[in-house]
Each structure stands twice: as structure tokens, then as C-alpha cells.
Amino acid sequence: MSRITTGQSRVTVDNWQEPANLPWSFLHMDELFANAAIRAVAKDSASPLQRAMPEDPLGLRGVVVRLPDGSDRTVEEVLAATSTDAWMVLHGNEVLVEEYFGAMSHDTRHLLMSVSKSIVSSVLGVLVAQGKIDTAQPIEHYVPELRASGYGGATVRDILDMRSGIKFSEEYLDASSEVRKLDEAVGWAPRNGGAGTLKEFLLTLEQVREHGGHFEYRSCETDVLGWLCEAASGKQFAELASEVLWSRMGARHDAFISLDAAGTGMFDGGICATLGDMVLFGAMIRDGGVSLNDERILESDWVDDIFTGGPDSATAFAAGDHAEGMPGGKYRSQFWFLSDDADTAYCLGIHGQMVYINRRSGVVGVKFSSTALPVDPAAGPAAAAMFEAISRRLTP
């Protein structure tokens, strides 16, 4: 068992996800678990980001935010109330605000949780452009092992949009839920008699309804996509992601992904990266697949499809469990749309990880957090409202 002593606390596989340990755990995943590096460019290369001087020249910390409950708070107050570890706002290619709290710094890799899903999707999008993956094909066309599982017959697109018919509970606080069994399989929690690797776990999942139905958020879908990327490319995900994404978009620091006992990546939530590099990722999506250093990473059609959605994406979302809290929203290729605003996409992860991408205003915002609750009903909406208020402030 991994055990790290930090000051007066002991962080282990047993307790790293306890609220008091999260601010440390999220910055030290490479000390707790095996990992593989997603290599960046050489550190002496020029950064495509332009830093604004002086700090916060437009006074964005003082912008008033209207929260979902009708109350008003300043950006600074929202940050203080939502367990913020770091945040940044990019407008065009200019960084307007960049701030770190606690032990965070510009070169600290923070756990992305499910923001990782959007990175996996983007790697897959490159393979689609290369002709190595057809999203209309059933998953077993590329991963024959899944033919006899509940995923048999599900298309790649079904899985990309989380519309397979797989039974999977995403209840983070339920010890018996499938998402917690997934944690055990990848080594993020002590095993309790279940599968010992991620792939073994995925093969146990059962189909309970037709594939291609309503949207249902399930982390296992992204793990299948990560397996698909490796099968279609013949490369381990960390090497592949470095080759087609991370090194090409101008990332300044290596990212890394947690590995299970077999060396398979924890695709749905195990990537760790720096704040600045995630801003570069968001800017690439905002700019139609072209990075700030003028490298085309994704085809414009792929990115446009994320924002436009499929012909029934909104209907599939409206039939799912998130419709009441996000009226008009949709989910496409592992990106969230929290309302009917088709120009604003989100990458979201539990405990307060967020990438905000607004194509209309040109604003990209990234927030790393360590909220006590996996899904905080106040903190998450407050962070989204904060970036929306900043975006309106910066829109001519």
C-alpha cells in the first residue's frame, strides 16, 4: 500500500479521498500511484500565452456574480467560498488573471478528475481524422474483447455521448456503486473482492437497455474510449496523447495519467496537468482545433460538432437525469453544455475541476479546486456563474 507522510497527516490509498486530504492528494497523485508521463515540448521553447501586466488589469476579481439562488457575490468571494486551488482567465491569447493558493504553483500538476474525459475524447478525435476510428462502427470492431460484454453492439458514438445501455451507478458516496468498484479495480481504493484491473472491470458490466437511448453520465464510457484509442493506434495512451495532442499544442509541462496494476490508464479521471496547460487545451477547442502556436490538432468539423451536437443530442439530454438542473443542456463527445447556449462548452470534474470555453466572447477559464463534496450543489454552479459573469464583462 502506498503511504506518504506529510506534516502531521498520513495519506494512503485508504484515505486520500477524505475531504481533509484532498488539497494534498490532488497535487501528489504521482507519489500515491503508478503513472505514465504525457510528454510536453521542451521547457525552453517559447510559450504561446501572453501574460498581462499588471496583474488583473481589468479588475476581474471585483466583478459581481449573480448566483443561481439570486444572491450577488464578487468573483473574489466566489473563489474563497469554493475551495479554489488555482484559477486562470484567458482572453484571446492574453492571460488576464492567474492565481495560485496553498501549495499550488505554475508548475504543479493537479488532478483533473473527469476533465480527463475531454482530453481522451480529443485524442480519439485525432484518430478519427487519421481514419483509424469510425464513430459509427460498433466498439467490438476495434476491441473484440468487448463483444461478449454489455457493450456488444454499442457504437463508438453511443459511448462518446454516454448513451450506451450499460448499467452503471455514478453515486460517488455509495460504497456499493459501480463507480466505487471502478476505483477499486484501478487501485484508487482497497479491493473488496472485485475486479483487479480496469479492463477486467469493464468486461463485467451489463446491458440493461438499448444502446443509443437517453444520456446517462457514466465514467466507464470514457474508460472504454481509452481502451479503444490504444487498440486503434497500437500505442499506450500516454505515448499517444503526447504525440498527437500534448506536445503539439505547446504544453509547457509533462502531464501524467494514473495506471492500474496492469499498466492501463485511469482514463476517466486520472490525468494530472498544470493550470496553464489546461488553458492551452481550452483555447485549442475554442479556436476550432488549432492551438495557440498555430498547430492544427483537431479537424474543425470535429470541434464544430461538439458545439452543434447531434440531431437528437438535446432530446437525449432532456430525457436523462441532468435535465432538471441544466434545462436546454446537452452532452457531446465528452463535453458539457449547461444550457441552450451552444457557444459555451465545459469540461467538468468532481471536487470542483472546470474548464470554461466560450467561443463567442473568446474567454477560456480554468479552475482547480478541492471541494469536500464530489458534487457540491452550490460550488459548481457558482464557479460556472463566475466565468459567465467574467465573459460578459469582457464581451464588447
Image (cartoon, helix red, strand yellow):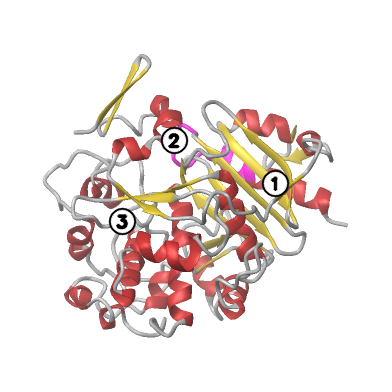
Which residue type carries mark 3? Gly
As drawn, which residue projects farthest toward the front?
44
Give the dominant element type of the magenta stretch: helix, strand or loop: loop
Q: In the image, what residue occupies the spot 47% across and 74% down?
A: 126
Residue at x-position 55% and y-position 71%? 297
Instruction: Report if residue 72 is visible in the image.
Output: no
Q: Single out the residue that lies furthest toward the left.
A: 193
Q: Distance of mark 1 from mark 3, alpha carbons?
A: 30 Å
Instruction: From the top left corner, tell me how far across and down residue 37 is, in percent.
Output: 37, 52
Q: Which residue is mark 3?
A: 265
Dot 3: few (<14), some (14–19), or many (≥20) neighbours within 10 Å?
many
Q: Residues within 10 Å of mark 2 (few under 14, many from 20)?
A: some
Residue behind mark 2:
27
Residue that carries the numbered disc 1 in the rendered image: 89
Q: Work out whether mark 1 precedes mark 3 in sequence or the reverse, and give the earlier one.
A: 1
Examine the rendered structure and indicate whether residue 129 appears above or below residue 186. Answer: below
**Could you say which is closer to the camera, residue 57 or residue 268?**
57
Which quadrant of the figure contains the C terminus?
A: bottom right
Judging depth in this view, the residue of 173 and 355 nearest the camera is 355
Nearest to N terminus: mark 1 or mark 2: 2
Residue 96 lies in what quarter of the image?
top right
Highlighted magenta segment, given as a residue range: 371-383
Q: Secondary structure at mark 3?
A: loop
In the rendering, at what x and y percent does residue 388 appear? 72, 50
Secondary structure state at the residue bearing disc 1: strand
Nearer to the camera, 10 or 138: 10
Disc 1 marks a residue whose amino acid type is Val
How many labels were placed on the picture? 3
